[in-house]
Image (spheres, rainbow, N blue to C red):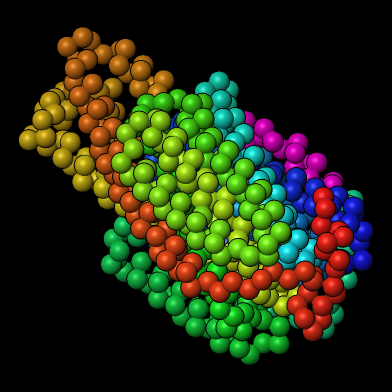
Amino acid sequence: MEHLSHQRKITIMVAIIVAMFFSSINQTIVGVALPRIIAKLGGMDYYTWIMTIYLLTSTISTILVGKLSDIYGRKPFILFGIVVFMLGAFFSGTSRDIIQLIIYRGIQGIGAGVIMATAFTAVGDLFSPRERGRWAGLMSAAFGISSILGPGVGGYIVDHMDWHWVFWMFLPLGFLAFFMILFLFPKVKRRKSESIDYLGSLFITLTIVPMLLAFSWAGTKYPWGSPLILELFAFAIVSLAFFIFTETRVKTPLLPLSLFKNRVIAISNVIGFLMNAGMFGALIYMPLYVQGVMGVSATYAGYVAMPMSLSMFTVSAYTGRRMTKTGKYKKMALLGTFLMVFGMALMVTMNTIMMAAISMFIFGFGLGLGMPVFTIAVQNAAASSDLGVATASIQLFRSIGGTIGIAVMGTILSTSMAGKMKNLVTADSGINPALVDPAMTDKLAQLQNPQILLDQPKLMAIQDSLPAPLQPVFTQITEALREALAASLSNVFLTGAIVLAAAFVLTFLLKEVPLRTTVHKAGNAVTQNSEKNSAI
Protein backbone atom coordinates (compact mmCIF):
# COMPACT_ATOMS: atom_id res chain seq x y z
CA MET A 1 0.00 0.00 0.00
CA GLU A 2 3.04 2.26 -0.35
CA HIS A 3 1.50 4.18 -3.25
CA LEU A 4 -1.21 5.67 -1.05
CA SER A 5 -0.89 9.29 0.03
CA HIS A 6 -0.03 9.97 3.64
CA GLN A 7 -3.42 11.60 4.24
CA ARG A 8 -5.21 8.51 2.86
CA LYS A 9 -3.16 6.30 5.16
CA ILE A 10 -4.15 8.40 8.16
CA THR A 11 -7.82 8.09 7.15
CA ILE A 12 -7.48 4.31 6.89
CA MET A 13 -5.83 4.19 10.31
CA VAL A 14 -8.74 6.13 11.82
CA ALA A 15 -11.09 3.46 10.45
CA ILE A 16 -8.89 0.68 11.86
CA ILE A 17 -8.73 2.31 15.29
CA VAL A 18 -12.52 2.66 15.35
CA ALA A 19 -12.84 -1.07 14.60
CA MET A 20 -10.33 -1.90 17.35
CA PHE A 21 -12.07 0.39 19.81
CA PHE A 22 -15.39 -1.31 19.09
CA SER A 23 -13.83 -4.70 19.85
CA SER A 24 -11.96 -3.60 22.97
CA ILE A 25 -14.80 -1.56 24.55
CA ASN A 26 -17.02 -4.63 24.35
CA GLN A 27 -14.34 -6.61 26.19
CA THR A 28 -13.65 -4.07 28.94
CA ILE A 29 -17.32 -3.35 29.56
CA VAL A 30 -17.94 -7.05 30.21
CA GLY A 31 -15.08 -7.50 32.69
CA VAL A 32 -16.48 -5.42 35.55
CA ALA A 33 -20.08 -6.47 34.86
CA LEU A 34 -19.29 -10.19 34.77
CA PRO A 35 -19.62 -10.89 38.51
CA ARG A 36 -23.14 -9.44 38.52
CA ILE A 37 -24.08 -11.28 35.31
CA ILE A 38 -22.90 -14.53 36.89
CA ALA A 39 -24.98 -13.74 39.96
CA LYS A 40 -28.07 -13.32 37.73
CA LEU A 41 -27.52 -16.33 35.46
CA GLY A 42 -25.88 -18.60 38.02
CA GLY A 43 -22.92 -20.84 37.31
CA MET A 44 -20.04 -19.54 39.43
CA ASP A 45 -18.16 -22.71 38.47
CA TYR A 46 -18.14 -21.46 34.87
CA TYR A 47 -16.84 -17.96 35.73
CA THR A 48 -13.51 -18.40 33.95
CA TRP A 49 -15.11 -20.11 30.95
CA ILE A 50 -16.75 -16.88 29.81
CA MET A 51 -13.26 -15.45 29.35
CA THR A 52 -11.57 -18.71 28.37
CA ILE A 53 -13.87 -19.48 25.44
CA TYR A 54 -13.40 -15.94 24.14
CA LEU A 55 -9.62 -16.28 24.18
CA LEU A 56 -9.72 -19.82 22.80
CA THR A 57 -11.75 -18.93 19.71
CA SER A 58 -9.87 -15.68 19.17
CA THR A 59 -6.58 -17.60 19.36
CA ILE A 60 -7.61 -19.99 16.60
CA SER A 61 -9.04 -17.29 14.34
CA THR A 62 -5.93 -15.11 14.84
CA ILE A 63 -3.47 -17.65 13.49
CA LEU A 64 -5.74 -18.84 10.67
CA VAL A 65 -6.40 -15.32 9.44
CA GLY A 66 -2.75 -14.23 9.68
CA LYS A 67 -1.61 -16.21 6.64
CA LEU A 68 -4.90 -15.91 4.75
CA SER A 69 -4.73 -12.12 4.97
CA ASP A 70 -1.20 -12.25 3.55
CA ILE A 71 -2.72 -13.98 0.51
CA TYR A 72 -6.10 -12.26 0.10
CA GLY A 73 -5.48 -8.90 1.75
CA ARG A 74 -6.69 -7.49 5.08
CA LYS A 75 -9.98 -5.83 4.04
CA PRO A 76 -12.34 -8.84 3.64
CA PHE A 77 -11.17 -10.33 6.91
CA ILE A 78 -11.53 -7.23 9.04
CA LEU A 79 -15.06 -6.76 7.63
CA PHE A 80 -15.84 -10.41 8.38
CA GLY A 81 -14.46 -10.01 11.89
CA ILE A 82 -16.65 -6.98 12.63
CA VAL A 83 -19.81 -8.78 11.45
CA VAL A 84 -19.08 -11.93 13.47
CA PHE A 85 -18.22 -9.89 16.56
CA MET A 86 -21.48 -7.94 16.29
CA LEU A 87 -23.49 -11.16 15.97
CA GLY A 88 -21.76 -12.62 19.01
CA ALA A 89 -22.42 -9.46 21.03
CA PHE A 90 -26.09 -9.36 20.06
CA PHE A 91 -26.73 -13.01 20.91
CA SER A 92 -24.75 -12.74 24.17
CA GLY A 93 -27.34 -10.21 25.30
CA THR A 94 -30.13 -12.72 24.65
CA SER A 95 -28.56 -15.45 26.82
CA ARG A 96 -30.92 -17.23 29.20
CA ASP A 97 -28.30 -19.28 31.01
CA ILE A 98 -24.55 -19.48 31.46
CA ILE A 99 -24.08 -22.11 28.73
CA GLN A 100 -25.69 -19.89 26.08
CA LEU A 101 -23.53 -16.97 27.19
CA ILE A 102 -20.38 -19.09 26.86
CA ILE A 103 -21.36 -20.19 23.33
CA TYR A 104 -22.10 -16.65 22.17
CA ARG A 105 -18.92 -15.31 23.76
CA GLY A 106 -17.08 -17.92 21.70
CA ILE A 107 -18.60 -16.40 18.56
CA GLN A 108 -17.49 -12.96 19.74
CA GLY A 109 -13.98 -14.31 20.22
CA ILE A 110 -13.80 -15.45 16.60
CA GLY A 111 -14.59 -11.94 15.44
CA ALA A 112 -12.20 -10.33 17.92
CA GLY A 113 -9.30 -12.53 16.79
CA VAL A 114 -9.87 -11.62 13.16
CA ILE A 115 -10.14 -7.89 13.93
CA MET A 116 -6.97 -7.77 16.03
CA ALA A 117 -4.85 -9.86 13.67
CA THR A 118 -5.75 -7.81 10.59
CA ALA A 119 -5.66 -4.42 12.35
CA PHE A 120 -2.11 -4.74 13.66
CA THR A 121 -0.90 -6.24 10.39
CA ALA A 122 -2.47 -3.42 8.35
CA VAL A 123 -0.25 -0.96 10.21
CA GLY A 124 2.72 -2.92 8.91
CA ASP A 125 1.36 -2.66 5.38
CA LEU A 126 0.99 1.09 5.60
CA PHE A 127 4.01 2.31 7.54
CA SER A 128 7.68 1.58 8.14
CA PRO A 129 8.65 0.07 11.53
CA ARG A 130 9.97 3.47 12.62
CA GLU A 131 6.57 5.08 11.94
CA ARG A 132 4.66 2.10 13.32
CA GLY A 133 5.87 3.00 16.78
CA ARG A 134 3.66 6.09 16.82
CA TRP A 135 0.65 4.19 15.52
CA ALA A 136 1.22 1.28 17.88
CA GLY A 137 1.11 3.80 20.72
CA LEU A 138 -2.12 5.31 19.40
CA MET A 139 -3.69 1.86 18.99
CA SER A 140 -2.71 1.01 22.55
CA ALA A 141 -4.20 4.34 23.57
CA ALA A 142 -7.48 3.20 21.98
CA PHE A 143 -7.36 0.21 24.31
CA GLY A 144 -6.66 2.65 27.14
CA ILE A 145 -9.69 4.79 26.34
CA SER A 146 -11.90 1.71 26.13
CA SER A 147 -10.48 0.57 29.47
CA ILE A 148 -11.39 3.96 30.97
CA LEU A 149 -14.94 4.02 29.61
CA GLY A 150 -15.75 0.30 29.69
CA PRO A 151 -15.59 -0.52 33.40
CA GLY A 152 -17.56 2.56 34.45
CA VAL A 153 -20.23 2.03 31.80
CA GLY A 154 -20.43 -1.70 32.50
CA GLY A 155 -20.81 -1.13 36.22
CA TYR A 156 -23.47 1.53 35.71
CA ILE A 157 -25.47 -0.71 33.37
CA VAL A 158 -25.66 -3.67 35.76
CA ASP A 159 -26.44 -1.37 38.69
CA HIS A 160 -29.17 0.67 36.98
CA MET A 161 -30.27 -1.17 33.83
CA ASP A 162 -30.85 -4.67 32.51
CA TRP A 163 -27.50 -6.50 32.16
CA HIS A 164 -28.26 -7.37 28.53
CA TRP A 165 -27.34 -3.80 27.56
CA VAL A 166 -23.74 -4.57 28.48
CA PHE A 167 -23.53 -6.38 25.12
CA TRP A 168 -25.87 -4.15 23.12
CA MET A 169 -24.78 -0.65 24.14
CA PHE A 170 -22.01 -0.24 21.55
CA LEU A 171 -23.48 -2.18 18.63
CA PRO A 172 -24.04 1.07 16.65
CA LEU A 173 -20.29 1.64 16.81
CA GLY A 174 -19.86 -1.69 15.03
CA PHE A 175 -21.93 -0.48 12.09
CA LEU A 176 -19.83 2.70 11.93
CA ALA A 177 -16.59 0.69 11.93
CA PHE A 178 -17.91 -1.67 9.23
CA PHE A 179 -18.83 1.08 6.78
CA MET A 180 -15.64 3.06 7.42
CA ILE A 181 -13.55 -0.01 6.56
CA LEU A 182 -15.81 -0.86 3.60
CA PHE A 183 -15.40 2.51 1.93
CA LEU A 184 -11.93 3.63 3.05
CA PHE A 185 -9.80 0.48 3.12
CA PRO A 186 -8.20 -0.34 -0.27
CA LYS A 187 -8.45 -3.75 -1.90
CA VAL A 188 -5.36 -5.88 -2.46
CA LYS A 189 -4.99 -8.44 -5.25
CA ARG A 190 -4.57 -12.06 -4.24
CA ARG A 191 -1.14 -13.63 -4.51
CA LYS A 192 -2.06 -16.28 -7.05
CA SER A 193 1.16 -18.24 -6.62
CA GLU A 194 0.40 -19.09 -2.99
CA SER A 195 -1.80 -21.95 -1.84
CA ILE A 196 -3.74 -22.40 1.40
CA ASP A 197 -2.32 -24.73 4.04
CA TYR A 198 -5.48 -26.69 4.90
CA LEU A 199 -3.66 -29.48 6.74
CA GLY A 200 -1.71 -27.01 8.83
CA SER A 201 -4.94 -25.19 9.71
CA LEU A 202 -6.53 -28.46 10.79
CA PHE A 203 -3.61 -29.63 12.94
CA ILE A 204 -3.04 -26.27 14.64
CA THR A 205 -6.73 -26.22 15.58
CA LEU A 206 -6.52 -29.82 16.85
CA THR A 207 -3.50 -28.76 18.91
CA ILE A 208 -4.91 -25.60 20.47
CA VAL A 209 -8.45 -26.74 21.32
CA PRO A 210 -7.65 -29.89 23.38
CA MET A 211 -4.67 -28.19 25.02
CA LEU A 212 -6.72 -25.24 26.22
CA LEU A 213 -9.62 -27.49 27.23
CA ALA A 214 -7.21 -29.57 29.32
CA PHE A 215 -5.81 -26.50 31.07
CA SER A 216 -9.30 -25.12 31.64
CA TRP A 217 -10.78 -28.32 33.10
CA ALA A 218 -7.76 -29.62 35.02
CA GLY A 219 -7.96 -28.97 38.74
CA THR A 220 -11.53 -27.70 38.59
CA LYS A 221 -13.89 -29.97 36.66
CA TYR A 222 -11.49 -32.94 36.62
CA PRO A 223 -8.32 -33.83 38.55
CA TRP A 224 -5.02 -33.06 36.80
CA GLY A 225 -4.18 -36.77 36.61
CA SER A 226 -7.62 -37.91 35.39
CA PRO A 227 -7.78 -40.00 32.18
CA LEU A 228 -9.67 -37.30 30.25
CA ILE A 229 -7.12 -34.56 31.02
CA LEU A 230 -4.21 -36.83 30.15
CA GLU A 231 -5.92 -37.88 26.90
CA LEU A 232 -6.49 -34.23 25.93
CA PHE A 233 -2.83 -33.37 26.53
CA ALA A 234 -1.71 -36.48 24.61
CA PHE A 235 -3.99 -35.59 21.69
CA ALA A 236 -2.61 -32.04 21.65
CA ILE A 237 0.99 -33.31 21.61
CA VAL A 238 0.30 -35.71 18.73
CA SER A 239 -1.49 -32.98 16.76
CA LEU A 240 1.43 -30.62 17.36
CA ALA A 241 3.83 -33.24 15.98
CA PHE A 242 1.70 -33.61 12.85
CA PHE A 243 1.50 -29.81 12.54
CA ILE A 244 5.28 -29.41 12.70
CA PHE A 245 5.74 -32.21 10.15
CA THR A 246 3.17 -30.60 7.83
CA GLU A 247 4.76 -27.15 8.06
CA THR A 248 8.12 -28.53 6.93
CA ARG A 249 6.57 -30.10 3.83
CA VAL A 250 3.97 -27.70 2.39
CA LYS A 251 4.80 -24.99 -0.12
CA THR A 252 3.08 -22.16 1.79
CA PRO A 253 3.01 -23.05 5.49
CA LEU A 254 0.38 -21.55 7.77
CA LEU A 255 3.06 -20.71 10.35
CA PRO A 256 6.54 -20.86 8.80
CA LEU A 257 8.84 -22.49 11.35
CA SER A 258 11.72 -20.45 9.97
CA LEU A 259 10.20 -17.44 11.75
CA PHE A 260 11.35 -18.82 15.07
CA LYS A 261 14.96 -19.05 13.95
CA ASN A 262 14.92 -15.28 14.31
CA ARG A 263 15.89 -14.58 17.91
CA VAL A 264 13.87 -11.35 18.15
CA ILE A 265 10.66 -13.07 17.01
CA ALA A 266 11.20 -16.13 19.21
CA ILE A 267 11.99 -14.17 22.40
CA SER A 268 9.18 -11.65 21.79
CA ASN A 269 6.65 -14.44 21.40
CA VAL A 270 7.72 -16.16 24.63
CA ILE A 271 7.60 -12.84 26.51
CA GLY A 272 4.16 -12.11 25.05
CA PHE A 273 2.98 -15.54 26.23
CA LEU A 274 4.21 -14.94 29.79
CA MET A 275 2.95 -11.37 29.97
CA ASN A 276 -0.57 -12.33 29.00
CA ALA A 277 -0.54 -15.40 31.22
CA GLY A 278 0.29 -13.28 34.24
CA MET A 279 -1.79 -10.29 33.24
CA PHE A 280 -5.04 -11.87 32.08
CA GLY A 281 -4.77 -14.68 34.57
CA ALA A 282 -4.82 -12.28 37.47
CA LEU A 283 -6.49 -9.04 36.33
CA ILE A 284 -9.83 -10.64 35.46
CA TYR A 285 -10.15 -11.30 39.19
CA MET A 286 -9.75 -7.66 40.25
CA PRO A 287 -13.51 -6.99 39.85
CA LEU A 288 -14.12 -10.16 41.85
CA TYR A 289 -11.87 -8.81 44.62
CA VAL A 290 -13.37 -5.32 44.67
CA GLN A 291 -17.00 -6.47 44.57
CA GLY A 292 -16.72 -9.71 46.53
CA VAL A 293 -14.13 -8.83 49.19
CA MET A 294 -14.51 -5.06 49.55
CA GLY A 295 -18.28 -5.07 49.01
CA VAL A 296 -18.17 -2.30 46.40
CA SER A 297 -20.93 -1.89 43.81
CA ALA A 298 -20.25 -2.74 40.16
CA THR A 299 -20.29 0.96 39.23
CA TYR A 300 -17.55 1.88 41.71
CA ALA A 301 -15.63 -1.29 40.84
CA GLY A 302 -15.30 0.19 37.37
CA TYR A 303 -13.77 3.33 38.85
CA VAL A 304 -11.14 1.24 40.63
CA ALA A 305 -9.93 -0.01 37.25
CA MET A 306 -9.74 3.52 35.86
CA PRO A 307 -6.24 4.42 37.20
CA MET A 308 -4.75 1.54 35.20
CA SER A 309 -6.51 2.71 32.07
CA LEU A 310 -5.46 6.33 32.51
CA SER A 311 -1.80 5.49 33.04
CA MET A 312 -1.78 2.99 30.16
CA PHE A 313 -3.48 5.48 27.84
CA THR A 314 -1.00 8.25 28.63
CA VAL A 315 2.17 6.17 28.62
CA SER A 316 1.38 4.11 25.49
CA ALA A 317 1.06 7.28 23.42
CA TYR A 318 4.45 8.43 24.77
CA THR A 319 5.98 5.00 24.06
CA GLY A 320 4.93 5.16 20.42
CA ARG A 321 6.35 8.64 19.91
CA ARG A 322 9.58 7.67 21.64
CA MET A 323 10.09 4.60 19.45
CA THR A 324 9.45 6.69 16.33
CA LYS A 325 11.96 9.32 17.43
CA THR A 326 14.80 7.05 18.57
CA GLY A 327 14.17 3.77 16.74
CA LYS A 328 14.95 1.96 20.01
CA TYR A 329 12.73 0.02 22.38
CA LYS A 330 14.55 -2.35 24.79
CA LYS A 331 14.86 0.02 27.78
CA MET A 332 11.13 0.75 27.62
CA ALA A 333 10.39 -2.98 27.50
CA LEU A 334 12.53 -3.60 30.58
CA LEU A 335 11.04 -0.76 32.59
CA GLY A 336 7.52 -1.71 31.50
CA THR A 337 7.77 -5.37 32.50
CA PHE A 338 9.40 -4.42 35.83
CA LEU A 339 6.54 -2.05 36.70
CA MET A 340 4.00 -4.73 35.77
CA VAL A 341 5.67 -7.11 38.23
CA PHE A 342 5.73 -4.41 40.91
CA GLY A 343 2.06 -3.51 40.38
CA MET A 344 0.98 -7.14 40.53
CA ALA A 345 3.06 -7.71 43.68
CA LEU A 346 1.23 -4.85 45.39
CA MET A 347 -2.07 -6.59 44.64
CA VAL A 348 -0.99 -9.54 46.78
CA THR A 349 -1.10 -7.48 49.97
CA MET A 350 -3.76 -4.89 49.13
CA ASN A 351 -6.51 -4.48 51.71
CA THR A 352 -8.11 -1.16 50.79
CA ILE A 353 -9.71 0.39 47.72
CA MET A 354 -6.92 2.99 47.61
CA MET A 355 -4.26 0.27 47.57
CA ALA A 356 -6.10 -1.50 44.74
CA ALA A 357 -6.23 1.73 42.72
CA ILE A 358 -2.51 2.45 43.28
CA SER A 359 -1.49 -1.05 42.22
CA MET A 360 -3.65 -0.77 39.11
CA PHE A 361 -2.09 2.61 38.24
CA ILE A 362 1.44 1.21 38.47
CA PHE A 363 0.48 -1.88 36.49
CA GLY A 364 -1.09 0.24 33.76
CA PHE A 365 2.04 2.41 33.58
CA GLY A 366 4.14 -0.67 32.95
CA LEU A 367 1.63 -2.06 30.48
CA GLY A 368 1.68 1.16 28.46
CA LEU A 369 5.48 1.05 28.28
CA GLY A 370 5.94 -2.63 27.52
CA MET A 371 3.02 -3.92 25.50
CA PRO A 372 3.47 -1.95 22.21
CA VAL A 373 7.16 -2.81 22.02
CA PHE A 374 7.04 -6.50 21.19
CA THR A 375 4.66 -6.28 18.22
CA ILE A 376 6.84 -3.60 16.63
CA ALA A 377 9.99 -5.63 17.33
CA VAL A 378 8.48 -8.68 15.59
CA GLN A 379 7.30 -6.69 12.56
CA ASN A 380 10.71 -5.03 12.29
CA ALA A 381 12.43 -8.43 12.23
CA ALA A 382 10.04 -10.18 9.80
CA ALA A 383 10.17 -10.23 6.00
CA SER A 384 7.38 -8.35 4.27
CA SER A 385 5.96 -11.55 2.78
CA ASP A 386 5.51 -12.93 6.30
CA LEU A 387 4.23 -9.74 7.92
CA GLY A 388 0.71 -11.04 8.51
CA VAL A 389 1.74 -14.41 9.89
CA ALA A 390 4.53 -12.88 12.01
CA THR A 391 2.08 -10.41 13.56
CA ALA A 392 -0.42 -13.22 14.04
CA SER A 393 2.24 -15.31 15.77
CA ILE A 394 2.65 -12.85 18.61
CA GLN A 395 -1.12 -12.49 18.88
CA LEU A 396 -1.30 -16.29 18.97
CA PHE A 397 1.21 -16.66 21.78
CA ARG A 398 -0.42 -13.85 23.74
CA SER A 399 -3.84 -15.45 23.38
CA ILE A 400 -2.59 -18.90 24.38
CA GLY A 401 -0.78 -17.34 27.33
CA GLY A 402 -3.92 -15.51 28.43
CA THR A 403 -6.08 -18.61 28.08
CA ILE A 404 -3.68 -20.86 29.98
CA GLY A 405 -3.15 -18.14 32.57
CA ILE A 406 -6.89 -17.81 33.20
CA ALA A 407 -7.23 -21.59 33.43
CA VAL A 408 -4.31 -22.02 35.84
CA MET A 409 -5.36 -19.03 37.96
CA GLY A 410 -8.89 -20.41 38.04
CA THR A 411 -7.55 -23.71 39.35
CA ILE A 412 -5.54 -21.88 42.01
CA LEU A 413 -8.59 -19.84 43.05
CA SER A 414 -10.99 -22.79 43.20
CA THR A 415 -8.49 -24.99 45.06
CA SER A 416 -7.76 -22.25 47.58
CA MET A 417 -11.46 -21.51 48.04
CA ALA A 418 -12.25 -25.20 48.55
CA GLY A 419 -9.74 -25.35 51.38
CA LYS A 420 -10.99 -22.14 52.95
CA MET A 421 -14.65 -23.19 52.66
CA LYS A 422 -13.82 -26.54 54.25
CA ASN A 423 -12.40 -24.71 57.23
CA LEU A 424 -15.42 -22.44 57.27
CA VAL A 425 -17.88 -25.23 58.04
CA THR A 426 -15.78 -27.18 60.56
CA ALA A 427 -16.62 -26.99 64.24
CA ASP A 428 -13.19 -25.66 65.17
CA SER A 429 -13.32 -22.74 62.71
CA GLY A 430 -14.96 -20.44 65.23
CA ILE A 431 -18.08 -20.10 63.08
CA ASN A 432 -21.45 -20.73 64.67
CA PRO A 433 -22.34 -24.43 64.16
CA ALA A 434 -25.78 -23.27 63.06
CA LEU A 435 -24.23 -22.80 59.61
CA VAL A 436 -24.41 -26.54 59.00
CA ASP A 437 -27.55 -27.17 61.05
CA PRO A 438 -30.20 -28.76 58.79
CA ALA A 439 -32.80 -26.60 60.50
CA MET A 440 -31.15 -23.40 59.33
CA THR A 441 -33.28 -21.43 56.92
CA ASP A 442 -32.64 -21.63 53.18
CA LYS A 443 -31.73 -17.97 53.16
CA LEU A 444 -28.88 -18.41 55.62
CA ALA A 445 -27.76 -21.56 53.82
CA GLN A 446 -27.21 -19.46 50.67
CA LEU A 447 -24.30 -17.80 52.47
CA GLN A 448 -22.23 -20.96 52.09
CA ASN A 449 -21.74 -20.02 48.43
CA PRO A 450 -19.18 -17.21 47.81
CA GLN A 451 -21.17 -16.28 44.69
CA ILE A 452 -23.59 -14.44 46.99
CA LEU A 453 -20.88 -11.84 47.66
CA LEU A 454 -21.12 -10.71 44.02
CA ASP A 455 -24.77 -9.68 44.29
CA GLN A 456 -24.82 -6.90 46.85
CA PRO A 457 -28.57 -6.13 46.57
CA LYS A 458 -29.43 -9.79 47.18
CA LEU A 459 -26.98 -10.00 50.09
CA MET A 460 -28.57 -6.96 51.73
CA ALA A 461 -32.04 -8.39 51.16
CA ILE A 462 -31.06 -11.62 52.95
CA GLN A 463 -29.63 -9.63 55.86
CA ASP A 464 -32.77 -7.50 56.19
CA SER A 465 -35.00 -10.59 56.16
CA LEU A 466 -33.21 -12.33 59.04
CA PRO A 467 -34.40 -11.94 62.63
CA ALA A 468 -32.22 -10.08 65.14
CA PRO A 469 -30.76 -13.23 66.79
CA LEU A 470 -29.35 -14.36 63.44
CA GLN A 471 -27.76 -11.02 62.50
CA PRO A 472 -24.45 -11.82 64.29
CA VAL A 473 -24.35 -15.18 62.50
CA PHE A 474 -24.91 -13.43 59.17
CA THR A 475 -22.08 -10.99 59.88
CA GLN A 476 -19.75 -13.76 61.01
CA ILE A 477 -20.38 -15.91 57.96
CA THR A 478 -20.06 -13.11 55.38
CA GLU A 479 -16.85 -11.85 56.98
CA ALA A 480 -15.42 -15.37 56.91
CA LEU A 481 -16.43 -15.71 53.25
CA ARG A 482 -14.73 -12.42 52.40
CA GLU A 483 -11.56 -13.46 54.21
CA ALA A 484 -11.54 -16.80 52.37
CA LEU A 485 -12.02 -15.08 49.01
CA ALA A 486 -9.35 -12.45 49.79
CA ALA A 487 -6.77 -15.08 50.77
CA SER A 488 -7.53 -17.14 47.66
CA LEU A 489 -7.23 -14.12 45.37
CA SER A 490 -3.90 -13.19 46.99
CA ASN A 491 -2.59 -16.57 45.81
CA VAL A 492 -3.80 -15.76 42.30
CA PHE A 493 -2.09 -12.35 42.24
CA LEU A 494 1.13 -13.84 43.63
CA THR A 495 1.19 -16.42 40.83
CA GLY A 496 0.64 -13.64 38.28
CA ALA A 497 3.56 -11.66 39.72
CA ILE A 498 5.87 -14.68 39.47
CA VAL A 499 4.93 -15.30 35.83
CA LEU A 500 5.48 -11.62 34.95
CA ALA A 501 8.85 -11.72 36.72
CA ALA A 502 9.89 -14.48 34.30
CA ALA A 503 8.89 -12.21 31.39
CA PHE A 504 11.00 -9.41 32.88
CA VAL A 505 14.07 -11.65 33.09
CA LEU A 506 13.61 -12.84 29.49
CA THR A 507 13.44 -9.25 28.26
CA PHE A 508 17.17 -8.92 29.03
CA LEU A 509 17.74 -11.50 26.26
CA LEU A 510 15.82 -9.49 23.65
CA LYS A 511 18.19 -8.24 20.97
CA GLU A 512 17.49 -4.64 20.05
CA VAL A 513 17.44 -4.14 16.28
CA PRO A 514 17.06 -0.43 15.36
CA LEU A 515 13.69 0.20 13.74
CA ARG A 516 13.83 0.52 9.95
CA THR A 517 12.59 3.54 8.00
CA THR A 518 11.42 1.36 5.09
CA VAL A 519 8.15 -0.52 4.72
CA HIS A 520 9.96 -3.74 3.73
CA LYS A 521 13.27 -5.29 4.69
CA ALA A 522 16.32 -4.75 2.55
CA GLY A 523 16.20 -6.79 -0.62
CA ASN A 524 12.58 -6.02 -1.46
CA ALA A 525 12.32 -2.66 0.22
CA VAL A 526 10.32 0.29 -0.91
CA THR A 527 11.89 3.18 0.99
CA GLN A 528 9.66 5.84 2.45
CA ASN A 529 10.70 9.36 3.25
CA SER A 530 9.70 8.91 6.86
CA GLU A 531 11.07 12.30 7.87
CA LYS A 532 8.77 13.96 5.38
CA ASN A 533 5.70 11.86 6.01
CA SER A 534 5.92 11.09 9.73
CA ALA A 535 4.07 14.16 10.94
CA ILE A 536 0.49 13.40 11.83
Percent x, y of residue 431: 13, 29
Inspect this view and state whether residue 414 appears: no
Asked if 49 appears above or below 474 in the picture, the reply is: below
Q: Is residue 9 above or below residue 352?
A: below
**Picture quadrant of residue 515:** bottom right
x then y, percent, for residue 456: 40, 23
Q: Main secondary structure of the magenta part?
A: helix
Q: Quadrant of residue 480?
A: top left
Seen in the image, is 503 located left or right of residue 63? Answer: left
Q: How far from the left and from the top, in percent, is residue 275?
A: 48, 59
Q: Quadrant of the N terminus?
A: bottom right
In magenta, the rendered stretch is 164-181
Residue 226, compared with residue 495, is above or below; it is below
Query: Which residue is depicted at the point 27% across and 50% down?
Result: 415
Residue 173 lies in magenta, yes or no? Answer: yes
Query: How many numbered marks appear?
Result: 0
Residue 80 horizontal side relative to residue 370, left or right: right
